[in-house]
Image: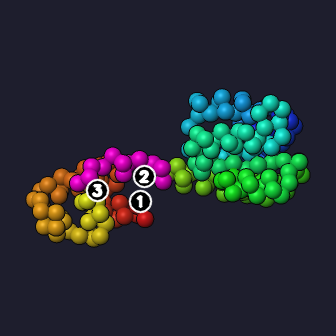
Amino acid sequence: MLHIVDDEEVIRDSLAWLAQSRCLPARGYAGGQEFLDALQDLDVSGDCVLLDVRMPGMNGIAVFDDLIRRGLLPRLPVIFLTGHGDVPMAVDSLKRGAFDFFEKPFNDNQLMDRVEEALAASRKAAASAGVQARLATLSAREREVLDLILAGMMNKVVADKLGISMRTVEVHRAHIFDKMQVKTAVELAGLLK
């Protein structure tokens, strides 16, 4: 989902139309606080924000600061849009984690290309966070077994190395595969590369 945060309705509508021309779902917000309020009810995995810098009430930089504080970057990449930007503002935003910074007027195709790249980056970050969450469910012993499986060791070698029975290794291996949602060691290695 592309979230468009801009106080100008005509800009929101034109950006939503551009997104739809590339089969990207979009939702507009008239201000920063409206967007932040809506975030509480959204799963932003795989999403992106087009964020105007200058808006009445809460400006785009304040919204960006709030997203950073909530730990939503890079799962929710931010592309700034502004008609009043300057180089120091752009550099500072990019250093702090913004995905990109566009000045109005902008090239429609270049902007949408970057939106698609940001959406892909968001999906990748969300998938990585999911893998990390699954890894966190493993016990210390399962982590030891996992490391040895990834090193290419067979169950008997793992059992000898850890001083446990081969049956115990098989049980740990089954738990690891179940928790990591894979069926083979090859899938597991691909997931964790």
**Of pointers 2 and 3, the one earlier in the residue sequence:** 2
**Residue 145 location, x and y as percent?**
24, 60
Task: Specify whether residue 151 is painted magenta.
Answer: no
Residue 17 drawn above or below residue 41 = below
Category of crowding for the residue at label 2, using alpha-carbon neighbours closer than 10 angstroms: few (below 14), some (14–19), many (at least 20): some
Q: Identify the residue under disc 2.
A: 131
Tell me whether circle 2 and circle 1 mark residues in contact (CB < 8 Å): yes
Category of crowding for the residue at label 3, using alpha-carbon neighbours closer than 10 angstroms: few (below 14), some (14–19), many (at least 20): some
**Of pointers 2 and 1, the one earlier in the residue sequence:** 2
The part of the chain drawn in magenta is 128-141
Q: Identify the residue under disc 1.
A: 191
Q: Is residue 28 visible?
A: no
At mark 3, the secondary structure is helix
- The foreground one among 38 and 18 is 38
Q: Quadrant of the C terminus?
A: bottom left
**Of pointers 1 and 3, the one earlier in the residue sequence:** 3
CA gap between label 2 and label 3 equals 14 Å
**Residue 91 location, x and y as percent?**
76, 58
Per the rendering, the mark at residue 168 is: none
Q: Quick check: 44 left or right of 171? A: right
Task: Specify whether residue 132 is painted magenta.
Answer: yes
Q: Amino acid at mark 2?
A: Val
At mark 1, the secondary structure is helix
**In terms of image quadrants, where is residue 34?**
top right
- Residue at image location 45% in from the left, 48% down from the top: 130
Q: Amino acid at mark 3?
A: Arg
**Residue 172 location, x and y as percent?**
21, 53
Q: Quick check: 148 left or right of 39? A: left
